[in-house]
Every structure is written in C-alpha cells, then in structure tokens.
Image (tube, rainbow, N blue to C red):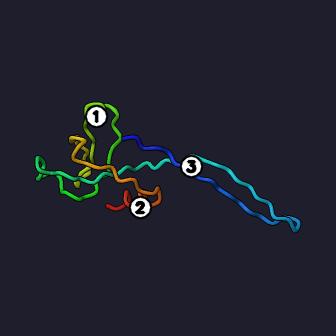
Amino acid sequence: MEHLSQSLMLIKVKKENNRWILRSSVRRVKSMHIFAVCIDNSDYQASLEKKKLYEVVPDPEAWKHNQIRIIDESGEDYLFPRGIFLEVPLPVEIAERVARIA
C-alpha cells in the first residue's frame, strides 16, 4: 500500500498600488490517515464487518508479509491478511474528519 503525498498549490492574490499581485507556492501535503474497507470477513467474523471502513496503521514490515495493520472498534490495532481489505483513497480533508469520529 503506497500512500503518496499530494501537492497543494497555494495562490494568493492581493491588490497593491492599484495592481494585482499573484503569489503562488507549492507544498507537499500528506494525510496522516489511511483507510481500507473489509471485503471478506469469513475467517474473522467476530472481529471484522464486511463493507466497513477501518483505519490503517502504516506498517512496512507487515506489508512485506502480505499483512495489513487495522484499528478496530476497541481502538487497538491488529494484523490481518492484506487481501481481505481494499484501500479507500480519501481526500485529505475527508480523511481528517473521518479520523476524528470516535
């Protein structure tokens, strides 16, 4: 699961001395929150719900072993097979709002 940074271009327009001045800058924005939806809970019916959105904890070592670290309802994170989830790319603003829901 490669979660890429997004570029955000900031444009500031200001009027000075009857002239419009345009200033722009580019900065990298990376959402701190990654989400995935469960697509198969057949071996984990007590722990996971199909079609439910779960927050992912980035874990490169787990990824190497074809696993994904998921935060469940208790707030704890557990490893599951990567193939039972699909990453759901969310815009940064939405990911931040969803992460704040408790």
Sort mark 2 into few (<14), some (14-19) or many (20+) by Cα contacts within 10 Å. Answer: few
Q: Which residue is mark 3?
A: 7
Residue in the image at 21% along x and 53% along y: 39
In 3D space, how far apart are the residues under numbered discs 2 and 1 (Cα atoms)? 26 Å
Q: Amino acid at mark 3?
A: Ser
Could you say where residue 34 lies in the image, as x and y percent from the top left? 37, 49
Could you say where residue 74 lies in the image, as x and y percent from the top left? 22, 53
Could you say where residue 41 lies in the image, as x and y percent from the top left? 15, 51
Residue in the image at 25% along x and 37% along y: 67
Nearer to us: label 2 or label 3: 3
Quarter of the image with the N terminus is top left
Q: SS for tag 2?
A: helix
Sort mark 1 into few (<14), some (14-19) or many (20+) by Cα contacts within 10 Å. Answer: some
Earlier sequence position, callout 2 versus callout 1: 1
Residue in the image at 56% along x and 46% along y: 28
Q: Is residue 74 above or below residue 13?
A: above
In 3D space, how far apart are the residues under numbered discs 1 and 3 (Cα atoms)? 28 Å
Residue 42 placement, left or right of 22: left
Residue in the image at 35% along x and 53% along y: 88
Q: Nearer the viewer, residue 38 or 61?
A: 38
Q: SS for tag 3?
A: strand
- Using the rendered view, name the quadrant where residue 50 is placed: bottom left
Nearer to us: label 1 or label 3: 3
Q: Which residue is mark 1?
A: 62
Q: Which residue is mark 2?
A: 97
Q: SS for tag 1?
A: helix
Q: Amino acid at mark 1?
A: Ala
Q: Amino acid at mark 2?
A: Arg
Earlier sequence position, callout 2 versus callout 3: 3
Residue 17 shows which numbered tag? none
Quarter of the image with the C terminus is bottom left
Earlier sequence position, callout 1 versus callout 3: 3
